[in-house]
Image (spheres, rainbow, N blue to C red):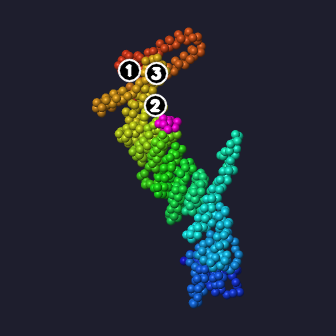
């Protein structure tokens, strides 16, 4: 009740104020004979000045000539009572200033009241049009201000082409500013050639801040016109970033969760339109906007539940330049039901698929040579290396999530081709974290995870860790130990090429081990694997001891070379070779089982290792 009374008092005060203002400029010595009502406000005026300028009022008065007609209500008058007051002043011949803040309203109200040259010379319509063409359309800031005024004058402002003329003027001015700025940055080099100074500040984009105040639908039309006029993609991208920061932070319900539900709904709907519009306006050129901005738009699109086309477009754009992304970029929160993963894994997987397909398509289109496309120095290959590290770090980050399914983890790991990873340390680390967080995983699932790792591509530190990792399947540990043995033997053979050591290949071992495993029962198979594991650990420890001894002898040789003469050095060298010769073949020639003989020789030294294995 109090609200209704306050509203009524406010209306009365407006009417009283409008009458006081009218009394200041109407003819006081002549009695008024018509009352005009606009949006609740009344104006006591005279018919003759209005009829002489306004075709609409002339027709209304002529239609009620026979009746006692003194009151007219003008419905849906553009600009409201304030604009009608200006039009009435013009009818009375009272001067007032036409500015960029009222010219759009005057153009629309003159069209509504039919204040054209047909009814009076130099009427309001021609005066407003002249100001719009000669003053407003030559100034970018004024055009922006007029566009703001047109937001409340639709669709009439569009029908009168006020908006299109301002938009075309803005685009032309922005393009001209950029051309002038580019010329100002031209300079001659020391050789006399004309070039662009890239370090000089570009001052042709000062209009970016001005455009951020326009409503989103009009802003879309402005940016589209700028593209047609040839404005640089970088400038358009900067404008989009500036507009998004203002619209999605100041007015965002996501940053103000304490607001009311109704306001939040309307604000969220507005933000969704802003995100979808900005995505549709993104330049097609790569790097026109930072990838961090694309990820920000994608997060907003996920949170606001924007259209699928909008999200897929962002995922495709990000996927084409995923090699410059960071781990924080990929950590997109999930906003679905409570049982879902902490991060949006599906979106990341789709971006990886886009990256892989884009990489494949580029390789197919590049007909220069197969060698160049597969070369480690080619851009696509370097991008693969960067993305593989990024994916491994991402897998390690999401691995502790209890809701992350094994199939999804494997799908992300297998998205990239096998040649993308030159080293598997990062993938091993991620799998180890997943095994630690999901301890109830079945043995078959653990084997699936282990198959992702190429144990030959593990570094020495990662291999040492994997050899002691009880979370890995036993077969995987055996593989790690065997490859460690191969690495040490090959290192020894490279150190002393005259010895009979030959690099050991693992194909034959894998075939024999596989055949043996297939012929045994599960119990015997497990016992055999345990035994192989123990023997390989013994051999690995023995090889490490041998390598340490060789390194010590190598240091001694260098010392003797610097101190002794050539004859003494050769004598000392032959003696040292004689001391080392038993390491080379004593275990391989004297017994069919080198592992067991080495166990008898070095059992005291490696007893602690055996105990930990058992």
Q: Which secondary structure, mark 1?
A: helix
What is the quadrant of the C terminus in the image?
top left
| Percent x, y of residue 539 | 41, 24
Q: Which of 498 and 399 is in front in this view?
A: 498
Q: Which badge, 2 or 1, is on the more N-terminal residue? A: 2
Residue at 65% in and 86% down: 32
Q: Nearer the viewer, residue 126 or 543?
A: 126
- Residue indicated by mark 2: 464
Q: Is residue 30 magenta?
A: no
The residue that label 1 is drawn on is 594
Residue 267 % position (x, y): 53, 62
Q: How crowded is mark 2: few (under 14 residues within 10 Å), some or many (20 or more)?
A: some
Dot placed on the residue nearer the N-terminal end, 2 or 3? 2
Q: Is mark 3 on a helix, strand or loop?
A: helix
Report the disc number at residue 493: 3
Q: At numbered mark 2, what does the secondary structure look like: helix, strand or loop?
A: helix
Give the residue at x 57% y 90%: 66
In this rendering, the label closer to the viewer, 1 or 3: 3
How crowded pointer 1 is (Cα within 10 Å; few <14, some 14-19, many 20+) is rated as some
């Amino acid at each position: 009740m109090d609200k209704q009374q306050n509203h009524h008092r406010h209306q009365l005060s407006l009417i009283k104020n409008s009458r006081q203002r009218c009394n200041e400029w109407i003819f006081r010595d002549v009695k008024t004979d018509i009352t005009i009502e606009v949006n609740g406000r009344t104006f006591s005026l005279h018919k003759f000045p209005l009829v002489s300028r306004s075709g609409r009022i002339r027709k209304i008065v002529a239609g009620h000539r026979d009746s006692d007609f003194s009151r007219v209500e003008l419905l849906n008058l553009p600009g409201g009572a304030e604009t009608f007051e200006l039009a009435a002043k013009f009818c009375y011949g009272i001067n007032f200033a036409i500015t960029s803040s009222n010219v759009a309203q005057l153009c629309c109200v003159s069209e509504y009241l039919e204040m054209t040259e047909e009814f009076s010379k130099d009427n309001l319509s021609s005066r407003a049009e002249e100001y719009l063409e000669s003053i407003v359309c030559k100034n970018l800031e004024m055009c922006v201000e007029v566009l703001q005024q047109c937001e409340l004058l639709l669709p009439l402002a569009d029908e009168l082409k006020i908006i299109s003329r301002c938009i075309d003027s803005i685009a032309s001015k922005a393009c001209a500013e950029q051309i002038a700025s580019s010329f100002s940055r031209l300079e001659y080099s020391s050789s006399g050639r004309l070039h662009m100074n890239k370090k000089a500040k570009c001052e042709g984009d000062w209009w970016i801040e001005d455009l951020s105040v326009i409503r989103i639908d009009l802003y879309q039309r402005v940016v589209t016109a700028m593209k047609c006029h040839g404005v640089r993609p970088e400038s358009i991208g900067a404008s989009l970033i500036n507009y998004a920061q203002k619209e999605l932070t100041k007015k965002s319900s996501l940053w103000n969760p304490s607001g009311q539900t109704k306001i939040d709904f309307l604000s969220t709907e507005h933000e969704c339109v802003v995100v979808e519009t900005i995505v549709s306006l993104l330049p097609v050129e790569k790097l026109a906007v930072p990838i961090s901005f694309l990820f920000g738009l994608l997060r907003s699109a996920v949170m606001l539940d924007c259209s699928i086309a909008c999200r897929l477009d962002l995922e495709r754009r990000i996927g084409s330049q995923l090699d410059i992304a960071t781990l924080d970029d990929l950590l997109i929160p999930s906003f679905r039901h409570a049982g879902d993963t902490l991060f949006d894994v599906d979106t990341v997987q789709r971006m990886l698929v886009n990256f892989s397909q884009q990489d494949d398509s580029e390789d197919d289109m590049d007909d220069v040579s197969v060698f160049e496309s597969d070369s480690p120095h080619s851009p696509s290959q370097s991008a693969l290396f960067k993305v593989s590290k990024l994916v491994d770090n991402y897998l390690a980050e999401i691995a502790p999530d209890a809701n992350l399914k094994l199939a999804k983890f494997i799908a992300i790991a297998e998205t990239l081709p096998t040649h993308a990873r030159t080293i598997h340390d990062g993938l091993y680390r991620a799998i180890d974290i997943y095994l630690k967080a999901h301890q109830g995983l079945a043995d078959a699932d653990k084997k699936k995870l282990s198959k992702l790792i190429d144990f030959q591509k593990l570094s020495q530190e990662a291999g040492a860790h994997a050899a002691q990792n009880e979370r890995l399947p036993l077969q995987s540990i055996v593989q790690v130990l065997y490859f460690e043995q191969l690495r040490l033997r090959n290192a020894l053979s490279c150190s002393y090429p005259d010895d009979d050591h030959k690099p050991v290949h693992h194909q034959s071992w894998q075939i024999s081990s596989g055949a043996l495993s297939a012929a045994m029962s599960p119990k015997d198979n497990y016992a055999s694997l345990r035994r192989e594991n123990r023997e390989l650990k013994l051999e690995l420890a023995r090889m490490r001891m041998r390598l340490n001894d060789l390194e010590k002898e190598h240091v001694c040789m260098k010392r003797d070379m610097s101190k002794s003469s050539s004859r003494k050095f050769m004598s000392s060298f032959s003696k040292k070779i004689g001391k080392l010769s038993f390491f080379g073949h004593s275990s391989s020639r004297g017994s069919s089982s080198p592992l067991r003989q080495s166990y008898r020789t070095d059992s005291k030294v490696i007893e602690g290792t055996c105990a930990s294995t058992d």
